[in-house]
Amino acid sequence: GFVFFTNYNSAKSLQIAENGKCCLLFFWKELERQVRINGVAEKISMQESIDYFNSRPDGSKIGAWASPQSLVVSGKAWLKETFEFYKERFKHGEIPKPPHWGGFRITPIKIEFWQGRPSRMHDRICYTSTSPNVWKIERLAP
């Protein structure tokens, strides 16, 4: 699957908690290409989240503590003060993973590859999972 990390209190995490069905989109305008992935998101294990968190630079670790992702804040000064608070708090030791931070894995059900072509005669190839490790491949009309 496709793994990403975020604040579990963020808007996207709360939406995933309500409905794990989701879509990822990777778009490269200059190449006229995109990949769209439909799937189901689930939290990864605590150990996987810890392992990834520990691989991050210290500034990113502190940022995970300092940022109430997606919430309205009073301003940039507040963010800086909060960052400095956690920087001071963890200056003499290891920076642990915050309890509100971790990863999700999106297990793909459908993957569509799109390649732009002249006159809107784009190439669209769709892979649909029919069972574990079995994919149906179809060409879609542009």
Image (tube, helix red, strand yellow):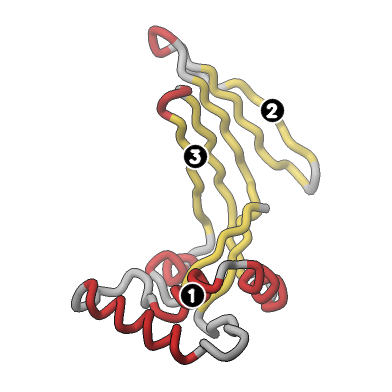
Q: Which amino acid type is shown beneath numbered disc 2?
A: Ile
Badge nearest the viewer, 2 or 1: 1
Where is residue 100 drawn, in percent x and y? 50, 81
Are circles 2 and 1 on residues that touch, CB within 8 Å?
no
Q: Is residue 139 above or below residue 21?
A: above
Give the CA distance from mark 2 to mark 1.
Answer: 35 Å
Q: Which mark is residue 137?
A: 2
Q: Earlier in the sequence, mark 2 or mark 1?
A: 1
Looking at the rendered structure, the secondary structure element under dot 2 is strand
Are circles 3 and 1 on residues that touch, CB within 8 Å?
no
Give the CA distance from mark 3 to mark 2.
Answer: 20 Å
Determine which quarter of the picture holds residue 120: top left
Q: Is residue 76 above or below residue 23?
A: below
Query: Seen in the image, is 66 located left or right of residue 78?
Result: right
Where is residue 27 drawn, in percent x and y? 46, 35
Query: Seen in the image, is 70 located left or right of residue 102?
Result: left
Query: Seen in the image, is 4 located left or right of residue 82?
Result: right
Give the CA distance from mark 3 to mark 1.
Answer: 23 Å
Where is residue 85 drawn, in percent x and y? 38, 88
Measuring 50% from the left and 18% from the top, which residue is drawn there? 141
Q: Earlier in the sequence, mark 3 or mark 1?
A: 1
Looking at the rendered structure, the secondary structure element under dot 1 is loop
Residue, disc 1: 8
Q: Which amino acid type is shown beneath numbered disc 1?
A: Tyr
Measuring 65% from the left and 73% from the top, which residue is drawn there? 54
Where is residue 113 drawn, in percent x and y? 57, 29
Q: Residue furthest front?
A: 92
Say which of 15 and 65 sits in front. Answer: 65
Residue, disc 3: 26
Q: Residue furthest right?
A: 133
